[in-house]
Image: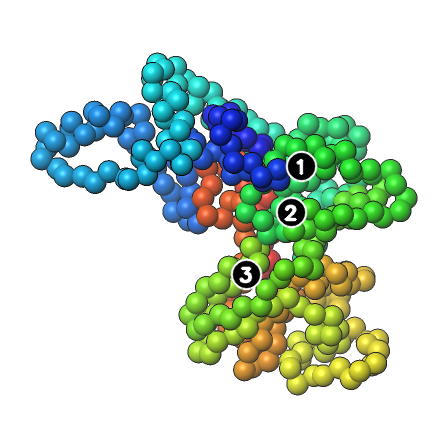
Amino acid sequence: MGVTSPLKDVGVLKDNGELIERGLSCIAREALLRRKVRLIRPLLGIKRDTLHAYLRLRGIAWIDDPTNDDLRFERVRVRHSIRFKSFFEVAQKVNEAALKRRQYAQMIADLILALDIVVEYGRCFIERPAPFLRCHPGFPFVVGLFAVLMGGRSYLLASQKLNALNQKLCLHSLEKKRFTLAGSLIEYSQKGIAFWREARNIQEAIILPGQTLLWDGRYQITNHERDALKVRAADLVHLKQFFRYGKYFSNTHIIKKGEVIGDMVDFEAMVDRKRPHFPSLQSLPLVLGAKGIDIPELSHRSCCHKVTVQRILAPFNWLSLCEDAALINAVEPFFNIT
């Protein structure tokens, strides 16, 4: 579950020293596509030759996937490595690996629920845990998981990165210390660990009418307007405008150069925080169009544009396994933004 599936051949892993695509060598019996469509593979226990013989008997034609014999693919290399082994033995190992993955996912889910974690407005904060939780074997994985989720990366951290991360974190320091990892800026001190998207490589994008865009690996944005919209990271000027003018915020409100923003109208109602954390707020999506400017995560009840914004979990957004369900179910509620 963690970094390498028990079924993987370590010698053929394409590990770039930072990230690994997990579990590609063993096709799961059940998975979830785009968090909506269940993929069930009832024929995994049937050998290909047996299936071919059945199709011939029924007079049914078929087309073989040309990649089935392409050694550039890991599943093919694994299949070749086990072809002379007992089918029962291989199936038993698969079942054992699936069980271990489910157990690990449940262990991580239990740990996440035991920790004091808050995710809101582009910032995640894990309050300094009790010593027994800090020493939990799954704690580095949880920290790495939230770093990846806040950074919008598609793959979880490899074991080398998790080990280095665990050694680097010192929760006894009076001073705040920072470093970047997996697209996140991580700040830690004796109070706990904070994460937010680092201010690099956040691209502007155009969303056409009716189009759904995956933006920065973190947000899925759908444009329900008749005109195209532009999305980019929120900037300090527009954030200050938002906190000053509240629901009346639009592109007609311009802050003059050098103007000090002192009146935070409806600030508590909008952000529910005593002081804004502008570095993380500047990672939120800002939508620009003919009707004005929206920062949907701050003003989803009063957006001037018709847009749907959903926070996604990049490592699990395209395809997730049923063995990871406990973990995903524990994490998803933190990222509901409406």
Mark 1 or mark 3, which is nearer the start of the sequence? Answer: 1
Q: Looking at the image, is 9 positioned above or below residue 213?
A: above
- Front: mark 3 or 2: 2
Can you tell which mark lies on residue 182? 2
Q: Identify the residue shown where x is 83% and y is 38%.
A: 171
Q: Looking at the image, is 82 positioned above or below residue 289?
A: above
- Dot 1 falls on a residue whose secondary structure is helix
Q: Identify the residue shown where x is 51% and y is 32%.
A: 13
Determine the CA span between mark 3 and mark 2.
Answer: 16 Å
Residue 90 position in % (x across, y down) = 39, 19
Amino acid type of the residue that numbered disc 3 sits on in the rendered structure: Trp
Residue bearing mark 3: 215
Left or right of 213: which side holds 281? right
Viewer can see residue 284:
yes
Residue bearing mark 1: 161
- Dot 3 falls on a residue whose secondary structure is strand
